[in-house]
Image: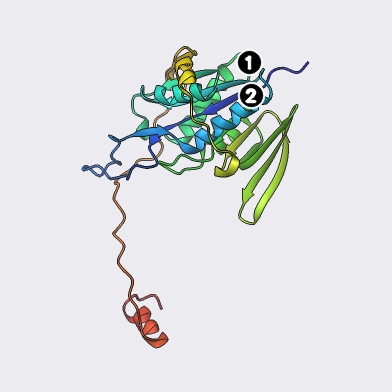
Amino acid sequence: MSNPLRIFVPVKRVVDYAVKVRVNPAKTDVDRNVKHSMNPFDEIAVEEAVRIKEKDPKTEVVAISCGTAKAQETLRTALAMGADRAVHVEVKDDSTLQPLAVAKLLKAYADKEANKPDLFILGKQAIDDDANQTGQMLAGLLKWPQTTFASKVEINGQDLKVIREIDGGLETVQTKLPAIVTTDLRLNEPRYASLPNIMKAKKKPLVKLTPEDLGIDISPRIETLKVEEPPKRVGGRKVESVDELIDKLRNEAKVL
């Protein structure tokens, strides 16, 4: 009999997708005193892990978040969606937490677990920094195969088949577990957590750790010097002829 599948799903608390992001007065960061929610791509990752669990109830789904104390709200959402337990790696300031540090924390926790994970499912990117780096960095640190931009995931024993989105269409790749998968938008549509499941989530285990517990230095390697809003777009202009267009491109826009 094969061992139960163990899936780790990292989730991030981000500024809600519906909020209009503004730069703070000091121009050091965006204004974070707004509504937050789970990163949409991470919701897709949780949903996919829960669907795998529904096909094989022995599967264990572990949600992990690296962030301030408020990240526990995001973890409770993942638990309400169907994750079995949660791990919170608490940091004092997650605004400077960078993808490499997160990847190192995830690897350290995976190494710490007595029963190693078979699969990490991550959102392909977070909508706040759009870095699209953590999954790939984690694969490099763990020395695991990676399948990114997944639009369909199939698991058969230790075989993993992923259909992924590329510029030219769809690509099918196959590898062995353990592995890393990052999710694209069309993989699934996340469920809404029901009220009974939200109540049950409050009783599910949530373990707290710190980077120091895992022996990881999370000091940022990149410093943000200044944050500014992009210049406002200027309305277009109509021209009467091709000659006038070329003249304006050459003499006004200076692009010819």
Q: Residue lying furthest left in this view?
A: 25
Q: Quadrant of residue 6?
A: top right
Which labelled disc corresponds to residue 60? Answer: none
From the viewer's perspective, tell me whether residue 178 is left or right of residue 202.
right
Image location (x, y in percent) of residue 149: 59, 43
Q: Quadrant of residue 152?
A: top right
Q: Residue 256, relative to residue 47: is it above or below?
A: below
From the viewer's perspective, tell me whether residue 57 is left or right of residue 30.
right
Q: For label 1, count other residues whose C-alpha is less than 10 Å away and answer few (under 14), some (14-19) or many (20+).
A: few
Which residue is drawn at the image coordinates 64% and 37% (left, top)? 146
Rounded to the nearest angstrom, the CA distance separating label 1 from label 2 is 17 Å
Say which residue label 1 marks.
115
Q: Quadrant of residue 189?
A: top right
Q: For label 2, count other residues whose C-alpha is less than 10 Å away and answer few (under 14), some (14-19) or many (20+).
A: many
Image location (x, y in percent) of residue 15: 36, 37
Say which residue label 2 marks.
53
Determine the secondary structure under disc 1: loop
Which residue is drawn at the image coordinates 31% and 78% (left, top)? 252
Which residue is drawn at the image coordinates 45% and 44% (left, top)? 130
From the viewer's perspective, tell me whether residue 166 is left or right of residue 131.
right
Q: Residue 65, relative to residue 130: is it above or below?
A: above
Residue nearest the observer in this picture, 182 or 95:
182
Image location (x, y in percent) of residue 210: 42, 18
Determine the secondary structure under disc 2: helix
Residue nearest the observer in this picture, 113 or 69:
69
Q: Residue lying furthest front in this view?
A: 195
Instruction: Indicate the quadrant containing the N terminus: top left, top right, bottom left or bottom right.
Output: top right
Q: Is residue 113 visible?
A: yes
Report the amino acid beneath label 1: Asn
The answer to which of marks 1 and 2 sits earlier in the sequence is 2
